[in-house]
Amino acid sequence: MPRRIKLTPRTLAFAITLAVAPGMAMAQATAKVCPLGAFVCPVVQNGFALCKKNDLLNFYVPGLPTTGARDSRPAQVTGDHFNSPDSNVFHVYGNASLQRLDQLLRADDLTYSQDSTAFDAEGHVRYQERGMLFSADSMKGTTDPEHGVAEHVRYQMLNSHGNGVASQVTMLDQDRDQLHDVTYSTCELDHRVWEIEAKTMTMDRDSGVGRAHDVVMRLKGVPFLWLPYLRFPLDHRRQSGFLYPSFGHRSRAGYFFSIPYYWNIAPNVDATFTPTWFTGRGGMLDTQLRWLTSTSKGELDLDYMPHDQVADRDRGLLTLKNQTHLPGGLYWNTSIARVTDKAWFQDFGQNLTSSAVRLLQSSSYVTAAGDWWNAGAGADWYQITDPALPDSAAPYRRLPRLFFAAERPIGAAGGLEWGVHAEAVRFVKPDAIGGDRFDLYPYLAWPMQGPAWFLRPELGVRYTAYNLAHPVAAGDPAHPTRTTPIFDVDAGLVFERQVHLFGQDYTQTLEPRLFYLRVPYRNQDDLPLFDTQPLTFDFWQLFTTNSYSGADRQQNANNLSAALTTRFLDPNGVEKLSASLGEIHYFDPQRVTLYPGQTLVDRSGSDYVANVAVSLSDSWRLTAAHLWDVQSGRTDVSTVGLQRRLGDDGIFNFDYRYRRGLLEQASTSAEIPVGAAWKLVGGYTWSLLEKRTIDSFAGLEWDSCCTSVRVLARHYVYDYQGHSDNAIMFEIAFKGIGASSERAGKFLHNAILGYQ
């Protein structure tokens, strides 16, 4: 009698994916900024793309030199009419101009003295050089020495978007100008969202720095900040100075305000200091130090709160990442993370991912690699950061760990290869059985392939030996070993055909694959458990030789995995659809368990596992994965993801996640452009098991020619006990005078897949 299959919402969702996807996959493609499905999109630097053309640029003359010394070039005077009272002084009028290399001065009336190099220009004065463009009522000075004074000036920087007006501009030398009663902004001249007013301002184009005195900053014409001195960048070169502040509210810490200071220590070293004040807890200093040398690159981050008013103690977080190239082709990689207390991430983490961090891992390794081998030596250690877990829950420290792996052909042995994986570890843990473990797996393989097939048999022996301080149980050996032969054969075929569907030509492949694995049973109850856990079952587990991580358990197997994959490729070779289905058939029972005495699972086959990935177009993408337990007729795992590109920089995501007995969640996130300057951002995650909101956020972004503003409100669960928190964040950036701290922006890059 045929078996009836019950369609649950999870299986129905996956079935709809399979049924609908092929027909939708044939939409015409158009290129977008960020590929669909990308986990991290490049940050789109809109810069001043929203700005209108400055009217001053109407008299910009392209093609003038941008390099060279002016001292060696003579001045050239031209005009429609001229007269000369003597052979030294020239009076030019009507399209009069004075040019020396990149300097070009044009006016209605120009007087020039050849001996003194003095000039006097009046009427519709326009001046251009390699770094600046301005108009003025009049201008006078000398070309040698280089000096000039212009009255009532409107100016535009040519290496940035800075512009403004000044009562007077004095050209001190080739690279420095001093402006009086001056305004500066990167906004359009007729639409000043923000503007700096200063008594005096010096612009040094050689260093890329502007310095202003007696400064008033205005927002929409309203003064909101006075400073006796302001230093700001004139171009994109890094400059020391304050970055944009951010402020907001979090229910576990109160209102907060932070203003970072960036220190450009050297071309290859910089630091950022971010003092933050939390009204509910006190002050904190975040410090970031970065370096890049010919042999090393790294980053040190230290968050330190001298006295938490709620916890009544000092608190902090330290992270260090460094990679150093040592002599002899060696590399030293270090990653260290330490926190003062387990509640740090709950109090200061930004979401469930960061606030519910249970474990921090630190490691330091020296590695080397060749064309056919790699090796390393180092250590790993851990820290528990979940208040609900005792310190004893931390994994074993690996002090030290050594590894070696190699694979290469055996001379002229007809394609045979030899390989080896070796590892030696000392495991250390307080109040637990520690010891040494040596794991060695040498193997021989014979890979063969043709245009439409491949075959790879492999035979190896896994030898694992221990040196324990104490036996696992009374009567067990203190030096247990395990020797297990492992044999597998991986084989597959690739069939192709040309198809024409929905008005498009495609190449369809059909790829059957078989994987046979034979591993005899070995009793492993006397072996300790140092770093081994069952692996999560997925499609790629069909083709692996062990269902456990680490070396403390090696599964027994007399298995045959069978899988079938089909793909649709467009004429450019781009994969538009991929669908796979597979299962493992067990000829022998699975007898190896993680712990002695665990109930054996005697079944004839694994879950059916299916994957689908469909690029509906460059604007649509659909992915799904499903694990179906045929014996119980239940779904074990199901995920569905849908992504829709909205224009060039908008995105909509929908995700459904289910794991039997553990979670069932649905979430959406979106970045929606509203016109050229506005965006709506938001996300919502709902737990169907708990019937509650796990995470929700909503915000508004505004990006204009010279200003960007981001407001974000959030409610989220911060631990596995279900406690929740609220946060509000506001960020404003005045383009061209610094860089923002981007706290909310960093969160959105992580929270919205494909966010730009």
Image (cartoon, rainbow, N blue to C red):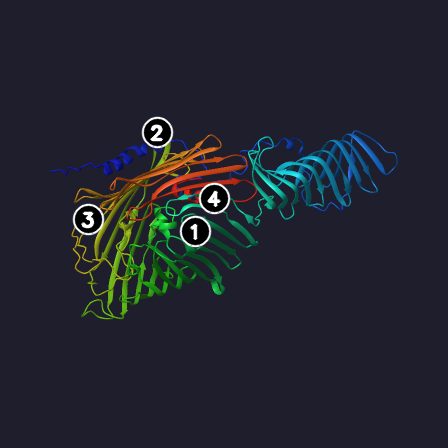
In the image, is 337 to the left or to the right of 600?
right
Query: Hey, what amino acid is under mark 3?
Result: Gly
> What type is the residue that disc 4 sits on?
Ser
Q: CA distance from mark 4 to mark 1?
A: 16 Å
**Label 3: which residue?**
605
Q: Secondary structure at mark 2?
A: loop
> Along the horizontal axis of the image, is 476 left or right of 261?
left
Q: Position of residue 541 (x, y in %)?
A: 28, 50
Q: Residue 502 got which mark?
A: 2
Q: Which residue is at the far right?
A: 86
Q: Please give the residue where the numbered disc 1 appears in the rendered image.
A: 282
Determine whether 317 is above or below 125 in the image.
below
Q: Earlier in the sequence, mark 4 or mark 2?
A: 4
Which disc number belongs to residue 246?
Answer: 4
Cα–Cα gap, marks 4 and 2:
51 Å
- Check disc 1 and report its element: helix, strand or loop: strand
| Numbered disc in front, either 4 or 1 | 1
Mark 3 vs mark 2, CA separation in Å: 38 Å
